[in-house]
Image (spheres, rainbow, N blue to C red):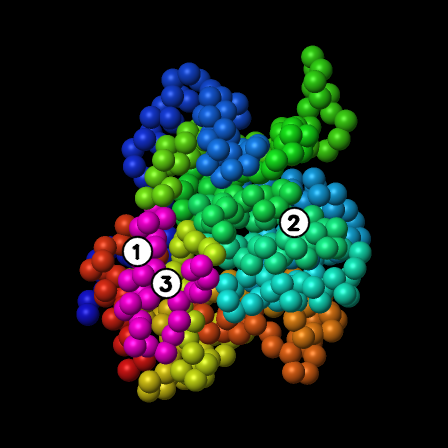
């Protein structure tokens, strides 16, 4: 096989032309700042699409999460239970408010927060009142179980639905299960504005507070008056125009992503791997990224440091490092699974709770004897495959053959 002439990416924006109409509208009307019709229409449209009462357009998903953390009342010295296997933007806003993230291990069924470990965490940190839950790669977590645990302990849920716009759990859209929720329109998401995000809530007072904070907390006065700290977090009317043009194509993008997932699943049926899992009876992911997990007995020897990886090739076996190198050789882009937060240098001293653990901080890679670190295991054996919805079926067939060749 020859390398692809045009690189096959992990996930890139898919534009349709409508976006230009709304960008031009912002330009022609001279509303190029953080107010304008695109923002007004987009907020209303997203709220209706997702099924929440209020949406606040912000500069990025991280800013939405930060304001959600503030709205939840998180303050210095608090503990906050956080999804462990995720991008660090899920967790960093907790640090912005000088609180302590307590990482909850992952479960194999959805690769999301383990409800059993979450209940264990409340035994150890019963004073915790906020849970930040992410839906990994567009697959909903076990949201009923997590919501029930939160209700039992009087805790607030912040749902990081940055990766899962359009996904549903028991027919209900993600981004509606928390008191405060966040979505993202980053360049590689299911729909994009090149940047941008939204805070979603059913609380009008909270929505108004977020709008105020996001515009430098300016008071209603004839001059610039400020009585509390604010942020430059509001979405641009130009960016809102891009997202406004993308929104009608959300379902089309999801269908394309699902087709990619299904082709991989069929193509790998004879390999010792599984695709990122979900419960077909109760959830429908948006299939943002297609990922695979290599069976334990089919893993060749692989070692990773903080910055490098090496492996020993073995007949009939492979590992994420070998497969990612093979994809890169043919000009295709894959990625490792999100490295769990408890393994990150900046968070290694934070508490990490497994469903069997005793809740101690993970100093010196500590885990109680007999405990299984699920997130570390998935990170070790998993990888994200090229999932760009502009990839043709023929190109994907070649990707599948490249992966198969690694097991020969």
Q: CA distance from mark 2 to mark 3?
A: 31 Å
Mark 3 / mark 1, whichever is N-terminal? 1
Residue drawn 78% across the image and 49% down it: 76
Q: Secondary structure at mark 2?
A: strand
In magenta stretch: residue 263: yes
Q: Secondary structure at mark 1?
A: helix
Mark 1 / mark 2, whichever is N-terminal? 2
Between 86 and 53, the one lying in front of the other is: 53
Viewer-nearest of discs 2 and 3:
2
Check disc 2 and report the residue beneath it.
157
Between 100 and 272, the one lying in front of the other is: 272
Picture coordinates of residue 317 (x, y %)? 37, 83
> Eyeballing the image, is 102 above or below 62?
below
Residue drawn 38% across the image and 17% down it: 28
Q: Quadrant of residue 383?
A: bottom left
Q: Quadrant of residue 328?
A: bottom left
Q: CA distance from mark 1 to mark 2?
A: 32 Å
Residue drawn 78% across the image and 53% down it: 78
Numbered badge on residue 385? 3
Residue drawn 68% across the image and 57% down it: 149
């Amino acid at each position: 096989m020859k390398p692809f002439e045009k690189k096959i990416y992990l996930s890139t924006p898919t534009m349709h032309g409508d976006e230009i109409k709304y960008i031009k509208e912002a330009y022609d009307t001279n509303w190029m700042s953080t107010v304008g019709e695109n923002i007004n229409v987009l907020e209303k449209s997203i709220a209706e699409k997702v099924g929440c009462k209020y949406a606040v357009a912000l500069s990025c998903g991280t800013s939405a999460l930060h304001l959600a953390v503030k709205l939840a009342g998180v303050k210095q010295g608090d503990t906050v239970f956080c999804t462990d296997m995720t991008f660090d933007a899920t967790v960093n806003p907790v640090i912005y408010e000088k609180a302590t993230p307590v990482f909850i291990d992952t479960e194999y069924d959805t690769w999301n927060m383990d409800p059993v470990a979450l209940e264990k965490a409340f035994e150890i940190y019963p004073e915790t009142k906020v849970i930040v839950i992410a839906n990994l790669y567009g697959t909903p977590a076990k949201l009923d179980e997590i919501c029930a645990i939160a209700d039992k302990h009087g805790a607030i849920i912040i749902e990081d639905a940055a990766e899962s716009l359009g996904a549903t759990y028991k027919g209900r859209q993600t981004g509606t299960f928390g008191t405060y929720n966040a979505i993202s329109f980053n360049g590689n998401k299911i729909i994009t504005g090149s940047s941008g995000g939204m805070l979603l809530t059913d609380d009008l007072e909270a929505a108004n507070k977020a709008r105020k904070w996001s515009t430098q907390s300016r008071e209603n006065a004839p001059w610039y008056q400020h009585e509390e700290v604010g942020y430059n977090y509001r979405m641009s009317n130009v960016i809102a125009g891009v997202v406004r043009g993308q929104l009608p194509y959300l379902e089309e993008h999801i269908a394309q992503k699902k087709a990619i997932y299904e082709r991989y699943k069929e193509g790998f049926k004879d390999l010792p791997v599984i695709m990122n899992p979900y419960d077909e009876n109760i959830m429908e992911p948006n299939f943002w990224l297609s990922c695979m997990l290599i069976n334990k007995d089919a893993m060749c020897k692989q070692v990773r440091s903080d910055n490098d990886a090496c492996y020993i090739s073995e007949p009939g076996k492979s590992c994420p490092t070998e497969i990612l190198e093979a994809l890169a050789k043919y000009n295709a882009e894959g990625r490792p699974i999100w490295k769990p937060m408890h393994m990150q240098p900046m968070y290694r001293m934070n508490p990490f709770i497994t469903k069997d653990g005793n809740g101690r901080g993970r100093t010196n890679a500590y885990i109680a004897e007999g405990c299984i670190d699920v997130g570390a295991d998935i990170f070790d054996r998993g990888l994200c495959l090229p999932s760009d919805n502009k990839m043709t079926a023929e190109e994907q067939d070649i990707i599948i053959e490249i992966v198969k060749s690694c097991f020969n």
